[in-house]
Image (cartoon, rainbow, N blue to C red):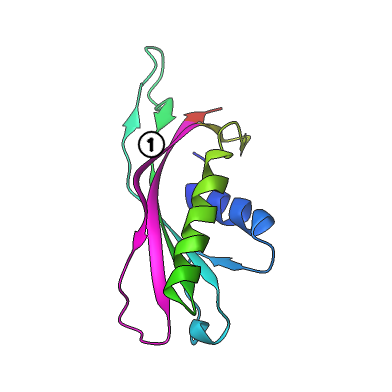
Amino acid sequence: MIDAEALVVAWLTARLGGVRVVAELPARFEQALPVVQVTCLPGPKLARPWSGTAPLLWRPRVDIDTYAATRAAATDLASTVSGHLYALAGQGNEWGHVTDVAEPAGPSWRPDYNPSVHRSGLTAELTIRAA
């Protein structure tokens, strides 16, 4: 199956010029804002073919946090990320293709323990069809 986290990191990196997009926050990341963090969450594997055991569809959730110097900047970045995610439909590689993107939890404010950053985020659900 396609690595959903790596796919989203690469996709957003190519579209958010100058914004660091990572899977794991680096130490002292607040010194170089804005930053987008992508985390793949578990999702069901569905639609097994009658002649095989590998699932045809996978529906992972991807949680995305946007960090910025102000609350407004973090919220704006989360909205921008949301718009770019919908364009993922039709993208993929030899392992699979994204056939649909849904957003069960749209951009919203997410308080953070670090007083040096402001955080917003969203959760997207990708439908990936195996190649």
Quadrant location of the C terminus in the rendered image: top right
Instruction: Kindly identify the residue that appears in the image at 55 percent across and 34 percent down.
Output: 89
Of residues 77 and 113, the one drawn nearer to the viewer in this rendering? 77
**Vertical position of residue 85 compared to residue 114: above or below:** above
Magenta-drawn segment: 100-128
- Rendered location of residue 92, percent (x, y): 60, 37
Disc 1 crowd rating (10 Å Cα; few below 14, some 14-19, many 20+) is: many
Amino acid type at circle 1 is Arg
The residue positioned 39% from the left and 60% from the top of the image is 121
Residue 65 sits in which quadrant?
bottom left
Which of these two is toward me, 41 or 20? 20
In the rendered image, is residue 97 in sight?
yes
Residue 17 in percent (x, y) is at 69, 63
Say which element carries label 1: loop
Please tell me which residue is depicted at 44% across the width and 63% down the height of the picture: 75
Q: Could you say which is closer to the camera, residue 16 or residue 98?
A: 16
Most common secondary structure along the magenta stretch: strand
Say which residue label 1 marks: 59
